[in-house]
Image (cartoon, coloured by chain):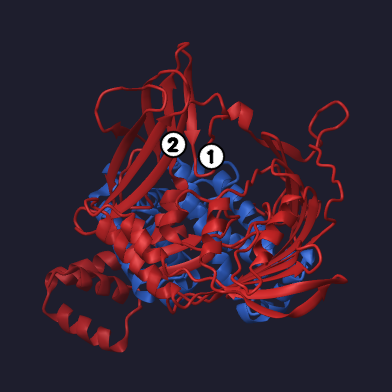
Amino acid sequence: MKCRKMKEKLSAYANGEVSQIEIEKVEEHLAGCAECREILEGYRKVRQEMANLESCPANIDIKESVLSEIRKKATNHRQIIWFKPAFAAILIVIVIVAGLVIWQPWRMETESGGLISTVKAATNGLQYYKAHTVHEVSQGYNSNIIYYEVAFAAPDRYRVEARDNFVSGGNVYIGKKIYNWGEEPVIPQIKMTGLSGEIVTSIGIPTKDEIRQMIDTLRDMEQFPDEAIDGVICLHYRGEIVSADDYEKKLSELDPDDPSYLYMKKMIDEMYSWSKNRKQEIEIWIGKDDYLPRKERHYMYLPPFTAQDEAYTMTRTTEYYDFNVPVEIEPPLDAEGNLIEGSSLAIDYELLSKYALNGSQHMGINIEDPAHQTVNFSITVTNRSTEIVRNIRIMVSTITTSGQEVPETMEAQPSTGGYVDLGPGESETFSLSWGFTSETVNNSLYEVVNASEVEARYIMTNNEELIQPFTRHTPTVTPDK
Amino acid sequence: MMVIPELDNTETVNRAQAGDVDAYGDLVESYQSQIIRYFFRMTGDTETARDLVQDTFLQVYKSLSKTTPDLPFKSWLYRIATNNVLQYRRKKKSLPSLRPMDNPGFEAESQSVNKVTNEAEVQDILLRIPAKYRACMILHYIDGFKYREIGQMLGMSEDAVRMRVARGSEEFRKRFDAGGEDAR
């Protein structure tokens, strides 16, 4: 009997890692199988040889340097911008309203129909405000509380500072530039283990469209007795977010001809049946006299995805204050216009505007045929400039985790073959497929996604050669209207 | 080097969680040589191992304050360490250096003349085994962890560990039997 299971048993047997019942079975088999006895000898030899490696390089003691590093409490210049990962669309459909964008009036179905328009009018006239947010998440023994302070002067002029027990940092948004400093605390990721392997993701700051979408799914808000917040009498509402429509919509977005269709559908089915036990709640307090928001509370509960996971809870409470008190939003520059130590210019949209392409990336997996499992990668680029862009090539660097030989950088192929030239506004899709072993990508799709980097190489009209990186964190830049 | 048994270091862990840097120093001291050896056997390179272990212990300290008092420290440490070393390996273009004895700072124990193979050859073969298998092999054969313990550390089932050790050992056995042709 030369099956793989027997080999695994023999290996475990050689290592003393078999149960009593298994010992009996193995020894019974070995009595009559010379080939397996030889294989067993081989495994015992492995054990022997590996013992050669029990020594350890001496003279490496990193304790002091680690401790001194900790005591220094060095800030680093790592740039963390709160953009959502581009692949979140296929993983989780959860939206949280952050108080950190322009406050959107709620669509509340209440008896006093005039409430909505009054709230709208009140916030339209609002120029400055400040907000203080406490954001608490926990999943099992992984938990964190992050404190945010926001000072808002205009949609393109505001400051966000964040801190938790260990790090602090912030971003300031001024016109087309984003500066940051310190080290921003990172919202702990949610870990879920399911059919699709392990999914690790995080909930970031939503876009305005997502906020609008979420507001649309609010059930009727329930009104509670008025409550005073910071001395101001407020109307008090609470409502629940329902996202039952997601399933049909997500399903309709799939292409049945795509080889990864069945796999993606499985993921969505899984998500959906789990998501029915989700809870998302919003509570708001609105000033009775001025209809300006004073406080918001968002609560989310995600049940464990499987027995291996823990439930995830998030509570985010924001208080607004200093309405129309002018705020100064200044970049972190000194008198000479140089960056203050510890801060950096994270993104300069004006600089980014030299790039001619916008890109969107999609990854799919085909696991239907165990002998030919593939990762399918496609990137669509659009020429957003006013000139012709020539000789566009798309290079992809990625990894597979083990057992598969994959060259480090590969070239994706356009749909039409040959070099690609794009006129203004034109698009082209490039694709790439590679094979993998079942235990690698299934368990670490997120890691493969994370590690993939895409680069577009092309030639501009002035014969300048550009290399434009596309990463998950590159924002899509739209031309000025 | 003082080795603090698992049961007794709960108090040290709790103090480190509360921010006691000296308590954390004790933890580093008790685990660093195992982790260094783990990384060295995974990468074949002392410099890399040193950098990785430093980063790992810094990262562990940062995350420690967010954990709860009942944290199983060793398992958690090994999980972070394993993630780090597997991720690191991915950025390398080629196989890491295969001659550990050439690296400064390394002191090899001399091998008995009766042994057919030596440490460098075995390390060489080990480095050619896929990283995920290699990690389980090192943890079992060199660190002496049982499959169940390894499973707890890395967040997988005992069966999954058994499979990885078996496949890694199979690879090892094949290359080993093929003799010196593969080894440089």
Per the model, the C-alpha gap separating discs 2 and 1 is 9 Å
Q: Residue at x 24, y 50 (%)?
A: A258
Chain B: colour as depicted: blue
Q: Nearer the viewer, residue A27 or A148?
A: A148
Indicate the position of residue B150 as horizontal and vertical percent values: 45, 71
Which chain is disc 1 placed on? Answer: A
Residue A266 position by quadrant: bottom left
Indicate the position of residue A3 as horizontal and vertical percent values: 16, 69
Looking at the rendered structure, the secondary structure element under dot 1 is loop
Looking at the rendered structure, the secondary structure element under dot 2 is strand
Sooner in the amino-acid sequence: mark 2 or mark 1: 2
Q: Kindly indicate whether the residues beneath marks 2 and 1 are on one polypeptide chain.
A: yes
Q: Decide: marks 2, 1 in contact (CB < 8 A)?
A: yes
In the rendered view of the protein, which quadrant contains the C terminus of chain A? top right
Q: Is residue A334 visible?
A: yes
Residue A320 position by quadrant: bottom right
Indicate the position of residue A100 as horizontal and vertical percent values: 69, 54
Q: Residue at x 54, y 30 (%)?
A: A479
Question: Would you place residue B40 above or below residue A411 in this image?
Answer: below
Q: Which residue is mark 2?
A: A359
Q: Which residue is mark 1?
A: A474
